[in-house]
Image (tube, rainbow, N blue to C red):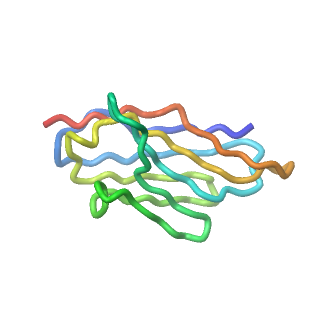
């Protein structure tokens, strides 16, 4: 089993910054993609950013230039640095990772979710 443990959410004023972390643990052989998604009240979950094992990253247009995703492969951890936060960034943020168990089977797991609230 692979567990994803997230940390770093909270309340911040518009224009402020937060850094989210997500650490994967368990019987992991390798991780392919680590990503952050978010879901605002009444809206569908959307992809915010992802980072692949070969170093590629991609961002939703709404966060380009403000958010930065990075990962520490040795620690199976992904980070999301969020700057210049706006009230519309308010959402529950979810980490997702996919990859391979040591036993050879594939996994795709989600974290428990972090509340991020940006006040105006």
Query: How far from the left and from the top, in percent, is residue 17?
Result: 27, 48
In the rendered image, residue 50, in percent from the top left (x then y), is placed at 49, 57
- Eyeballing the image, is 49 above or below 10? below
Q: Is residue 41 or residue 71 the one in the foreground?
A: 41
The residue furthest left is 120
In the drawing, does residue 92 fall left or right of residue 13? right
Name the residue: 62% across, 54% down. Answer: 75
Q: Is residue 80 above or below residue 113?
A: below
Residue at x 77% of width, y 55% of height: 29
Give coordinates of residue 26: x percent, y percent.
73, 42
- Residue 52 shown left or right of residue 64 in the figure: right
- Using residue 117 as the reference point, say whether residue 105 is left or right of it: right
Task: Judge whether 39 appears above or below 35 on screen.
Answer: above
Nearer to the camera, 23 or 66: 66
The picture quadrant where one finds residue 49 is bottom left
Quadrant (top left, top right, bottom left, bottom right) of the N terminus: top right
The residue sitting at the top extreme is 42
At 27% across and 53% down in the image, what residue appears?
83
Q: Which residue is at a point 44% across and 49% down the rendered structure image? A: 47
How many numbered badges does the structure rendering display?
0
- The C terminus lies in quadrant: top left
In the image, residue 20 lies at what x, y percent? 42, 45
């Amino acid at each position: 089993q692979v567990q994803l443990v997230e940390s770093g959410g909270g309340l911040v004023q518009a224009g402020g910054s937060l850094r989210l972390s997500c650490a994967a643990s368990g019987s992991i052989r390798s991780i392919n993609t680590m990503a952050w998604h978010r879901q605002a009240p009444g809206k569908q979950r959307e992809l915010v950013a992802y980072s692949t094992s070969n170093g590629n990253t991609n961002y939703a247009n709404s966060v380009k230039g403000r958010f930065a995703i990075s990962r520490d492969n040795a620690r199976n951890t992904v980070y999301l640095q969020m700057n210049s936060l706006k009230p519309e960034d308010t959402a529950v943020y979810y980490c997702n990772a996919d990859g391979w168990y040591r036993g050879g089977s594939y996994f795709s797991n989600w974290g428990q979710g972090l509340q991020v609230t940006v006040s105006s």
